[in-house]
Amino acid sequence: MDRAEQLMRIDYSIHFHVWSQASMWQFFCMLGKMMPEQFEIEVCLKYQEEVIWIIRKFNYQLPNINELPVLSEPPLYSIDRINDQTFSVSENSATLLQNGGHVIVVRGWALDKKMQSLAGGVIVELDGNDYKAQYGIEREDVEIAFCLSAGQSAGFECEIMVPGIMPGEHSLRLKVLANDQQSYYVSGVIILRITEAQQ
């Protein structure tokens, strides 16, 4: 007690850590699913008894896409995976096994075709409903393929929670915002076939 009072008198800087590195990681992952703003953990560095975190935000606020004009040309993009299934845009359809969590995860990359730069954001439309993707994920392969430095951060991932999704055909397409967020590109429709798990 005497020691505590002495430290208070000299205004000693004291703070308490209530998180382990593992529990802090879990906290950020849970927070990412609850918040409307999306972010990724860019750096997690343990230094002696402390842990340094650098968090990067994506698409803090996107404009109302319904108020923007649609560009006539198709977007410059690729969908690489839908859930655990490798996907090629040329296929125009994918078959997914219905899982207990009813989560559809769409991953790929997109660029502003006209400006040859990063897009202003990516939205995945499923059955007419829009879901904002996390955009700005590192994609060194896109940078190399297009000889474009902006391609390094052209990746996106969209996790869609659809607890009531039924087996059958569903439509999916991509809306890619232009870099200035004043217009957007629309992809062709991709048919998702959801199949029931065999008992």
Image (tube, grey):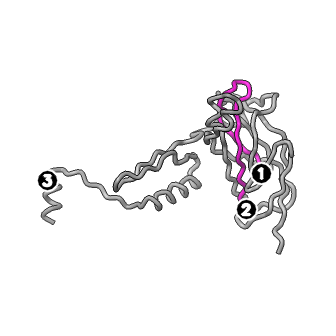
Q: Which residues lie in the magenta part?
A: 102-126
Residue 144 in the figure: left or right of residue 3: right
Query: Mark 2 is on which residue type?
Result: His
Query: Mark 3 is on which residue type?
Result: Arg
The extreme top residue here reads: 115
Q: Quadrant of residue 103?
A: bottom right
Q: Which residue is mark 3?
A: 9
Secondary structure found at label 3 = helix
What is the x, y in percent for residue 50? 36, 53
How much space separates mark 2 and mark 1, taking CA atoms?
A: 18 Å
How much space separates mark 1 and mark 3, taking CA atoms?
A: 63 Å
Q: Which residue is mark 2?
A: 102
N-term-proximal mark, 1 vs 3: 3
Residue 86 shows which numbered tag? 1
What is the x, y in percent for residue 9? 14, 53
Query: Mark 1 is on which residue type?
Result: Thr
Q: For the residue carrying disc 2, how many other residues have a C-alpha within 10 Å: few (<14), some (14-19), or many (20+)? A: some
Residue 19 in the figure: left or right of residue 194: left
Q: For the residue carrying disc 3, how many other residues have a C-alpha within 10 Å: few (<14), some (14-19), or many (20+)? A: few
Q: Quadrant of residue 145?
A: top right
N-term-proximal mark, 2 vs 1: 1
Residue 135 in the figure: left or right of residue 194: left
Residue 115 shows which numbered tag? none
Secondary structure found at label 1 = strand
